[in-house]
Image (spheres, helix red, strand yellow):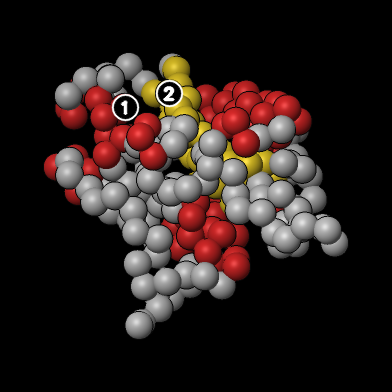
Amino acid sequence: MPRRPKTNTKGQVFHTTPHTFALVNLKPLLPGHILICPLHQPQTANSPRQPPPSRLTQLSPTQTSDLFHTVRRLTPTLTRLYSAHAFNIAIQDGAAAGQSVPHLHVHVIPRREGDMDARGGGDRVYEVLEKGEEGDIGAHFRARDGMEGEDGGARREKRFAADSERKPRSEEEMRGEAEWLREELERDGIYSTPAAITSGT
């Protein structure tokens, strides 16, 4: 079977901590829509590599704290950059909640007054989140682990007209946004810790 070309998803990551990484979105719902995800558990001599956590209850207290601290830490910079009045911060905790890739992730979506009026109102963001394509966290790990298949980890088919307007962005565009966000975070005194994500953990 043909294999889909691997994407350089590491270039989409703009912030890392010992337990978490943040990346730009393949098809953002609104400008500034990012994803924050827990890292894989590291492989040890006594245990093989663990799959990425897919549920909030699979995180340790330390991982949970780091995940939500990262959300809180990044939102002031996003507020400044996108003139945000508020945020949607959402987790689809399991397939029945609309999770389309088996890796826990937090959607952080800057909001402005009236930004969804043309698409049916502010609460429509939840409907689009549940049924739309939401970013390619799975591809990050498949590409890193050399497991990118022909379907790229088949996500749910899109059914919203508004979603069809959200075209996948190029690697170059996402890499540029990631570099810009990294620079702006550093301007605000927010630095990544050494990126465990690049060392295979």
Q: Pointer 2 and pointer 1: residues touching (CB < 8 Å)?
A: yes
SS assignment at label 1 = helix
Q: Which residue is drawn at 56% across and 72% down?
A: 146
Count how many numbered circles sit on residues in the image: 2
Q: Residue furthest left?
A: 161
> Residue 44 vs residue 84: left or right?
right
Amino acid type assigned to the residue bearing label 1 in the image: Tyr
Q: Which of marks 2 and 1 is in front?
A: 1
Q: Which of 191 and 100 is in front in this view?
A: 100
| Mark pair 2, 1: CA separation | 9 Å
Residue located at (57% from left, 32% from top): 56
**Can you give x and y, in whole percent of width and height, for residue 122 in the image?**
28, 20
Q: Name the residue under label 1.
A: 126
Residue 151 seen in the figure: yes
Looking at the rendering, in which quadrant would you find the C terminus? bottom right
Q: Position of residue 12 (x, y in %)?
A: 54, 55
The kind of residue on which mark 2 rests is Asn
The residue under the point 52% across, 24% down is: 79
Q: Foreground: 61 or 25?
A: 61
Q: Which residue lies furthest to the bottom in this view?
A: 1
| Residue 21 % position (x, y) | 64, 44
- The quarter of the displayed image where residue 181 is located: top right
| First in sequence: mark 2 vs mark 1 | 2
Residue indicated by mark 2: 88
